[in-house]
Image (cartoon, helix red, strand yellow):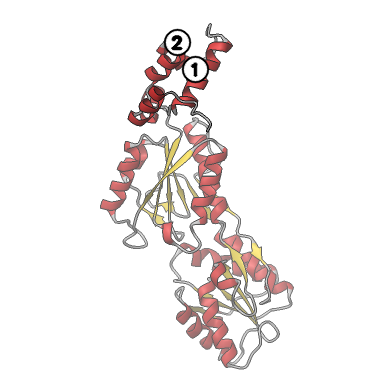
């Protein structure tokens, strides 16, 4: 049987928690020498043989630096905090993945504090404050604040103690930088796709008309039609309020118009599922008789409808990565490009157009 490389005393030390003094004793050097080696301090007289003994002692004893003490000493923790309600959302979790992947590339780490939003404008202030305070107690160097859907939010005042960047939302008080989808460009690219297929009469199933996504996507649709010398018929714009049932009812109203459209632009994928039902009830075929295009790219919907839904994707992963990049610039004291950065929403071709 192979013998353990750690001595009995090393095993005992590991159980009670290894200190820098334990490493120094095991390597037969001073604690100062250990500190210099572990902090990669240059211009010291420590020999390579001594350095190797210290590294070996660290590995044998299983020493881990005290992150809290190191953060206090250096005023750097290498941690960012993210306050978000999206931990259980079916598709917006890509914000976390994008931020996490970028942070890892930058040798940063994320602490995630789940939150809850009471409404579309103001957060549950008590919970938001508690989540932010808990992250600040861990001495995070910056904060990300991410929302499930594009809207204005009120961020706890304590968030301004460190650089803070908002993702998929914007500061209703106008003080903090944000990363948001370019809703208008996304609406334009959707309708341009329908125009390229020869459609000239296009119906729009809208979201709640007052939210930023609805305003921007509808403006983009009008931009595309105007560039083609066309106008959007107001009779063919009906709100479905983001639900499948709402999409069904809106599609019924549009399709029963005396002069119905040959294409529907649904401002989210859930409404498109309702529109599919309304279309099939009328004996119409997608895309032969009528084309349908969605928005969001909720894969559990878009990829499993029949025919599969052509849609515009919200760039959650890219927004998360850009949020970390922006925090990196802010924590380094560098200027950022703009108070609000817009991220393109790509078109995903499937079979419904």
The vertical placement of 249 against 219, above or below, is below
Residue 270: image tag: none
Q: Is residue 353 left or right of residue 276?
A: right
The residue where tag 1 is placed is 54
Q: Residue at x 57, y 66 (%)?
A: 297
Left of 322 or right of it: where is 245? left
Query: Residue 266 appears at what percent x and percent y?
Result: 56, 74
Q: Determine the image quadrant of residue 347.
A: bottom right
Q: Position of residue 345 (x, y in %)?
A: 60, 59
| Foreground residue among 45 and 339 | 45
Decide if residue 305 is in sight here. Answer: yes
Task: Work out how far the residue at label 1 is from the one at label 2, CA to CA, in angstroms.
Answer: 8 Å
- 272 vs 78, nearest the viewer: 78
Sequence order check, earlier mark of 1 and 2 = 2
Q: Report which residue position mark 2 lands on.
A: 29
Residue at 46%, 12% in the rendered image: 33
Q: Residues within 10 Å of mark 2 (few under 14, many from 20)?
A: some
Q: Choose top left, top right, bottom left or bottom right for residue 79.
A: top left
Q: Nearer the viewer, residue 168 or 71?
A: 71
């Amino acid at each position: 049987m192979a013998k353990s490389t750690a001595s009995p005393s090393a095993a005992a030390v590991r159980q009670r928690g290894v200190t820098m003094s334990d490493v120094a004793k095991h390597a037969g050097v001073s604690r100062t020498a250990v500190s210099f080696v572990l902090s990669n301090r240059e211009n010291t007289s420590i020999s390579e043989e001594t350095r190797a003994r210290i590294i070996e002692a660290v590995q044998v004893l299983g020493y881990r630096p005290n992150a809290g003490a190191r953060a206090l000493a250096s005023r750097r923790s290498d941690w960012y905090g993210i306050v978000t309600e999206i931990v259980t959302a079916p598709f917006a979790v890509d914000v976390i993945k994008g931020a996490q992947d970028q942070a890892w590339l930058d040798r940063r780490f994320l602490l995630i504090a789940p939150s809850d939003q009471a409404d579309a404008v103001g957060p549950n202030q008590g919970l938001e404050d508690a989540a932010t305070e808990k992250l600040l107690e861990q001495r995070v160097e910056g904060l990300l604040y991410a929302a499930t859907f594009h809207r204005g939010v009120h961020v706890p005042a304590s968030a301004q103690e460190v650089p803070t960047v908002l993702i998929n939302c914007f500061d209703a008080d106008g003080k903090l930088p944000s990363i948001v989808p370019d809703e208008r460009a996304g609406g334009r690219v959707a309708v341009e796709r329908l125009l390229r297929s020869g459609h000239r009469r296009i119906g729009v199933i809208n979201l709640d008309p007052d939210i930023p996504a609805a305003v921007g996507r509808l403006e983009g649709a009008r931009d595309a039609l105007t560039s083609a010398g066309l106008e959007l018929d107001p009779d063919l714009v009906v709100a479905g309020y983001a639900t499948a049932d709402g999409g069904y009812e809106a599609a019924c109203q549009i399709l029963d118009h005396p002069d119905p459209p040959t294409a529907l632009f649904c401002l989210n994928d859930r409404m498109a599922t309702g529109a599919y039902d309304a279309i099939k009830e009328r004996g119409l075929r997608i895309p032969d008789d009528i084309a349908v295009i969605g928005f969001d790219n909720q894969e559990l919907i878009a990829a499993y409808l029949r025919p599969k839904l052509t849609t515009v994707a919200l760039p959650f992963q890219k927004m998360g990565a850009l949020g970390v990049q922006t925090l990196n610039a802010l924590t380094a004291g560098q200027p950022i490009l703009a108070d609000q950065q817009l991220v393109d929403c790509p078109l995903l071709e499937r079979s419904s157009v």
